[in-house]
Image: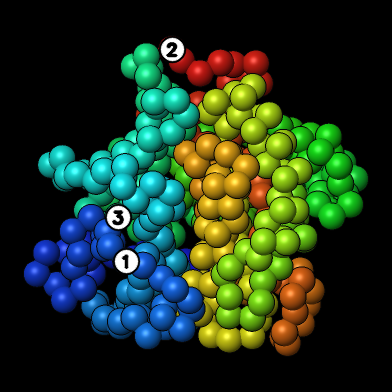
């Protein structure tokens, strides 16, 4: 991802394994803090392993293989920042579990492997019920990331473009809610892992999206200013309404940059921008953090076709990925449930 060519395999065990210079148990340090992007750059470290270059920076690992790039982030960072005192992190065999309190005595539990890859995320309610939000696991050995890229023909989109990609600045809450609860624009015959959705533009093209064009960023910044944060109230209300109707809803927040700067910087910035928006949605508008996930795409998919500075390209997009998302081990090849399906109890 991030440049021409196929996405790269981050090399299971090649970089983050015991005995290697870049090894960190659980994939990411638990005490990283970031003030600004200059600190990110200064803390970035480069490692070369098996012909690939790995860049470790606070909360992120970027992999370069020839002209292709991939970014992975600490799946626990956003939750740790929400409740630093109540956050718990422990190892259980080969897996790592994190816990953060949410919603009247409940918990959000995130399970990752030793490389920091998300395996599962679920809500645990005070009455003991557990509702799986994300099941990112698959059978067999850890596979190269390019095998998670799903190639499909372009969807036959038969709705107006302004309903396929909703202009947030011009939309009201009803229009945003419709986009965030609508089924895919074409039938989808099976479920996919979160990684497959993150890395497969052909999959995401089957979903409607909301272009949050009221949130743009200063050059080199991933901070959401207070005046722009207030403009997230409409989409936050739509998300909360959707989650109240279906507690298993999951929304992907996608970050983007303009074409200025290096691929590495742009991937890092875009990923952090997506996370910043997710944090604002939770901290200021009480959108449950477990129902949000993020991914940065750097300068891919420019909204304005320019190689120069462009505030319009420094943006975020939101998609409802629930209809595509595997939320149980038996869903990998199964058709999605009907819209009225309720989470298991």
Question: How many angstroms separate mark 1 from mark 3 (CA)?
Answer: 14 Å
Residue found 47% across the figure and 45% down from its top: 194
Residue at far left of view: 19
| Mark in front: 1 vs 3 | 1
Q: Of the numbered discs in the image, which one, if any, rests on residue 345?
A: 2
Q: Of the numbered discs in the image, which one, if any, rests on residue 32?
A: 1
Image colouring? rainbow
67 relative to 152, above or below: below
From the top left corner, tell me how far across and down residue 99 is, in percent. Answer: 31, 39
| Sequence-first tag of 1 and 3 | 1
| Mark in front: 1 vs 2 | 1
Question: How many angstroms separate mark 1 from mark 2 (CA)?
Answer: 37 Å
Question: How many angstroms separate mark 2 from mark 3 (CA)?
Answer: 29 Å
Quadrant holding the C terminus: top left
Mark 3, secondary structure of its residue: loop
Q: What residue is pinned by disc 3?
A: 116
Q: Is residue 253 visible?
A: yes
| Sequence-first tag of 2 and 3 | 3
């Amino acid at each position: 991802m991030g440049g021409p060519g196929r996405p790269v395999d981050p090399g299971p065990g090649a970089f983050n394994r015991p005995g290697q210079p870049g090894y960190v148990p659980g994939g990411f340090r638990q005490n990283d803090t970031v003030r600004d992007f200059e600190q990110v750059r200064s803390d970035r470290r480069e490692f070369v392993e098996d012909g690939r270059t790995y860049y470790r920076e606070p909360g992120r690992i970027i992999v370069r293989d020839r002209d292709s790039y991939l970014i992975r982030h600490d799946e626990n960072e956003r939750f740790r920042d929400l409740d630093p005192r109540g956050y718990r992190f422990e190892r259980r065999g080969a897996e790592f579990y994190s816990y953060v309190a949410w919603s009247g005595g409940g918990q959000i539990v995130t399970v990752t492997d030793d490389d920091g890859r998300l395996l599962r995320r679920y809500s645990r309610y005070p009455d003991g019920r557990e509702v799986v939000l994300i099941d990112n696991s698959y059978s067999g050995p850890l596979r190269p990331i390019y095998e998670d890229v799903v190639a499909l023909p372009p969807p036959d989109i038969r709705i107006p473009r302004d309903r396929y990609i909703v202009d947030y600045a011009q939309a009201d809450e009803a229009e945003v809610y419709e986009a965030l609860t609508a089924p895919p624009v074409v039938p989808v015959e099976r479920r996919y892992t979160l990684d497959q959705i993150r890395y497969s533009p052909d999959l995401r093209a089957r979903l409607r999206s909301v272009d949050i064009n009221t949130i743009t960023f200063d050059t080199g910044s991933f901070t959401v200013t207070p005046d722009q944060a207030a403009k997230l109230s409409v989409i936050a209300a739509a998300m909360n309404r959707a989650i109240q109707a279906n507690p298993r809803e999951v929304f992907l927040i996608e970050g983007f940059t303009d074409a200025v700067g290096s691929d590495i910087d742009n991937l890092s910035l875009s990923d952090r921008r997506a996370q910043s928006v997710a944090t604002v949605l939770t901290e200021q508008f009480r959108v449950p953090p477990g129902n949000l996930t993020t991914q940065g795409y750097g300068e891919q998919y420019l909204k304005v076709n320019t190689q120069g500075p462009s505030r319009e390209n420094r943006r975020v997009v939101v998609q409802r990925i629930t209809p595509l998302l595997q939320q149980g081990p038996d869903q990998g090849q199964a058709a999605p449930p009907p819209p009225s399906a309720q989470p298991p109890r």
